[in-house]
Amino acid sequence: MAKLTAQEERLTESYILLEMARKVLEKDLARLDQAPLKLKDPYIRLLEVTLHRLSREMYETRRSMKKLGLKIQLNDYDQTFSEYTIFFRGYVLTAKYLNAHLKNQVSRRIESLFTYGDKKLP
């Protein structure tokens, strides 16, 4: 059975985490818009800018995946695991990820997107 190369594995994990982070941030943005905050504009702006940065990163990841012929599909999920099917180089691989681990990874990814370092907001 064929295995994913290091680059394919990195792209696969990155795509899964970015897709989950996008869903989380979009839900949070919708909830924040309805929240009774006095100054919600800065928070909304932060989420919008973060979603924009995430979209650019997802675009690059998808483009790289397409070059390699790599496709990912969510099959099933429950309280403990999420199962993905990965199509690559004519092979099919099923991978299970622990949801707690995915949650921690998504949290770190969102934190890194919130952290601008020396970059200015657009």
Image (tube, grey):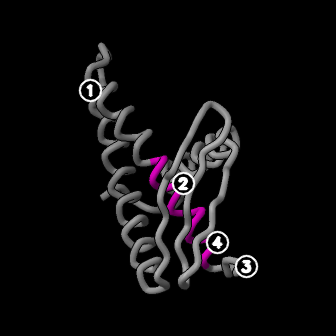
* Residue that label 4 marks: 9
- Kindly indicate the quadrant of the structure image that contains residue 85: bottom right
Residue 9 shown in magenta:
yes
* Residue that label 2 marks: 17
The residues bearing labels 4 and 1 have C-alpha atoms spaced at a distance of 36 Å
- For the C terminus, give its image quadrant: bottom left
Marks 1 and 2 in Cβ contact (< 8 Å)? no
* Residue that label 1 marks: 33
Asked if residue 54 is positioned above or below residue 99 in the image, the reply reads: below
Mark 1, Cα crowd under 10 Å, few <14 / some 14-19 / many 20+, is some
* Residue that label 3 marks: 1
Identity of the residue drawn at 49% across and 52% down: 74
Viewer-side label of 1, 3: 3
Frontmost residue, 47 versus 107: 107
Amino acid type, label 2: Leu
Amino acid type, label 4: Glu
| Residue 89 percent across, percent down from the top left | 55, 85
Is label 2 in a helix, a strand or a loop?
helix
Marks 3 and 2 in Cβ contact (< 8 Å)? no
Earlier in the chain: of badge 4 and badge 3, it is 3
The magenta region covers 8-21
Amino acid type, label 1: Asp
Marks 2 and 4 in Cβ contact (< 8 Å)? no
Amino acid type, label 3: Met
| Residue 54 percent across, percent down from the top left | 41, 57
The residues bearing labels 3 and 2 have C-alpha atoms spaced at a distance of 25 Å
Mark 3, Cα crowd under 10 Å, few <14 / some 14-19 / many 20+, is few
Earlier in the chain: of badge 1 and badge 3, it is 3
Viewer-side label of 1, 2: 2
Q: Which mark is residue 52?
A: none
